[in-house]
Image (cartoon, helix red, strand yellow):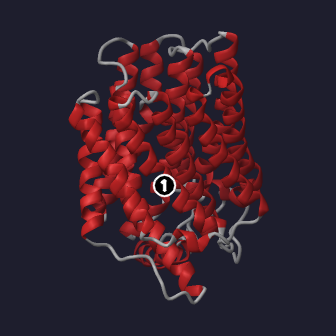
């Protein structure tokens, strides 16, 4: 479903809900009146904060890496970096996406106004705790509150709206919260190190394979039809089912038994099958429209990342290269693609990339490529690492600057 169609669906559903409830404190789109636009839909504050966090946290980590300094929080430098990219940046993007999608799924009112502000404060408190509270138990208690409340809010809406087909998304949100707890527990030497991060990344990899497999061919088809192209993306079929099933099995095995030979070959096969899906979606025909092409680039990163994770076990490829193909490459590119597109569509703007948006796509892709290449650079590791981090974080700072008037301003046509 396109952003325009989703917005129309939200309009109709919330209007029906408002009429039944007689709620005069909200407008026709379910937004609490009298509140600033930034607090009227979940994507607005969380996309903005996610971009700022990504733009600042990477330079902070590089500074810690090269100076040997650390923050006063409970995590050592490397673990803070990994935790904040997954449970800081990525979790904010997921929150913004799901809180905006729920009204369209369920026909219920969006989280808006003071409840949304409270959720934003919980996320912010988690970032402060992980950076500045030296007591690991206190930091854990503060940080895990946000995913717990977010999971409760998502389950409440799914159950109240009887929207069972999207229950798997609520399950994923819950798993993400559990992964956060496990990552803190690993820092306390209570569980095996890395299991929490693998659970979070495995869940997101599956979500990207599933949701990306819907939106990439759908948005591509819509754009190609407008260009009057007759060769369109292939419809969902047997290959897609096998690819998703293999990805689910490989992701689960990677979380549970990452060092097994079976896991390595399952990951490689999943990467090959996802790549085969991608080829059938006609991405090469979208080169003149970056906001569509970037979706194909992001899905391509996912295929490469899974294959590299498998090869890291059987061919000696540096694991850090494979992990950053998944995080900086697949997750970074796909989340930026969704953030740029959804923010335009849900604020009544034309869904097209201007030069600044195109620059974001170029810098995030180049930054990810350099970060993956860094372990192979030998004596050039440090400059390649710095260049990759600088380019990648620049993409998100550009988003924060370019989209600030959009996310903080009123919807067009209102």
Q: Quadrant of the N terminus?
A: bottom left
Height in image: 327 above or below 269? above
Q: Quadrant of the C terminus?
A: bottom right
The residue that mark 1 highlights is: 300
User: Is 73 on the left-hand or right-hand side of 213?
Assistant: right
Q: Position of residue 402 (x, y in %)?
A: 76, 55
User: How busy is the neighbourhood of tag 1: few (under 14 within 10 Å), some, or many (20 plus)?
Assistant: many
Height in image: 322 above or below 242? above
Residue at image position (28%, 66%) is: 239
User: Is 79 on the left-hand or right-hand side of 412?
Assistant: left
User: Is 151 on the left-hand or right-hand side of 72?
Assistant: left
The image quadrant of residue 196 is top left
Q: Is residue 24 visible?
A: yes
Pick the front one: 105 or 153: 105
Residue at image position (54%, 61%) is: 295
Residue at image position (64%, 44%) is: 51
Q: Is residue 151 visible?
A: no
The image quadrant of residue 210 is bottom left
Height in image: 134 above or below 167? above
Pick the front one: 322 or 364: 322
Pick the front one: 233 or 149: 233
């Amino acid at each position: 479903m396109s952003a325009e169609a989703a917005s129309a669906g939200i309009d109709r559903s919330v209007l029906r809900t408002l009429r039944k409830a007689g709620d005069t404190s909200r407008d026709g789109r379910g937004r609490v009146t009298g509140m600033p636009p930034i607090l009227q839909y979940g994507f607005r504050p969380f996309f903005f904060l996610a971009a700022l966090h990504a733009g600042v946290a990477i330079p902070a980590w590089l500074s810690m890496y090269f100076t040997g300094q650390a923050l006063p929080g409970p995590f050592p430098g490397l673990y803070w970096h990994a935790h904040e990219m997954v449970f800081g940046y990525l979790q904010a993007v997921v929150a913004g996406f799901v809180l905006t999608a729920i009204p369209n799924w369920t026909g219920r009112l969006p989280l808006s106004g003071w409840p949304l502000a409270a959720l934003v404060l919980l996320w912010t408190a988690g970032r402060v705790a992980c950076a500045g509270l030296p007591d690991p138990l206190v930091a854990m208690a503060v940080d895990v509150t946000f995913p717990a409340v977010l999971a409760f809010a998502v389950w409440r809406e799914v159950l109240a709206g009887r929207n069972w087909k999207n229950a798997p998304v609520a399950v994923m949100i819950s798993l993400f919260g559990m992964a956060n707890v496990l990552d803190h527990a690993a820092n306390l030497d209570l569980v095996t190190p890395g299991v929490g991060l693998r659970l979070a990344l495995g869940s997101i990899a599956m979500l990207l394979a599933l949701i990306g497999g819907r939106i990439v061919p759908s948005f591509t088809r819509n754009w190609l039809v407008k260009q009057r192209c007759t060769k369109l993306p292939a419809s969902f079929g047997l290959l897609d089912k096998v690819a998703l099933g293999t990805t689910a099995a490989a992701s689960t095995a990677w979380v549970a038994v990452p060092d097994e030979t079976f896991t390595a070959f399952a990951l490689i096969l999943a990467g090959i099958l996802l790549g085969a899906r991608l080829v059938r979606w006609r991405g090469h025909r979208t080169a003149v429209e970056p906001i569509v092409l970037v979706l194909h680039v992001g899905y391509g990163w996912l295929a490469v990342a899974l294959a590299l994770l498998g090869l890291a076990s059987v061919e000696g490829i540096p694991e850090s290269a494979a992990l950053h193909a998944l995080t900086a490459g697949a997750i970074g590119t796909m989340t930026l693609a969704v953030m740029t597109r959804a923010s335009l569509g849900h604020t009544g703007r034309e869904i097209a990339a201007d030069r600044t948006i195109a620059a974001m796509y170029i810098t995030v892709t180049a930054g990810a490529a350099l970060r993956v290449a860094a372990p192979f650079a030998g004596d050039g590791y440090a400059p390649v690492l710095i260049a990759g981090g600088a380019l990648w974080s620049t993409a998100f700072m550009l988003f924060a600057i370019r989209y600030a008037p959009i996310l903080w301003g009123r919807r067009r046509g209102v």
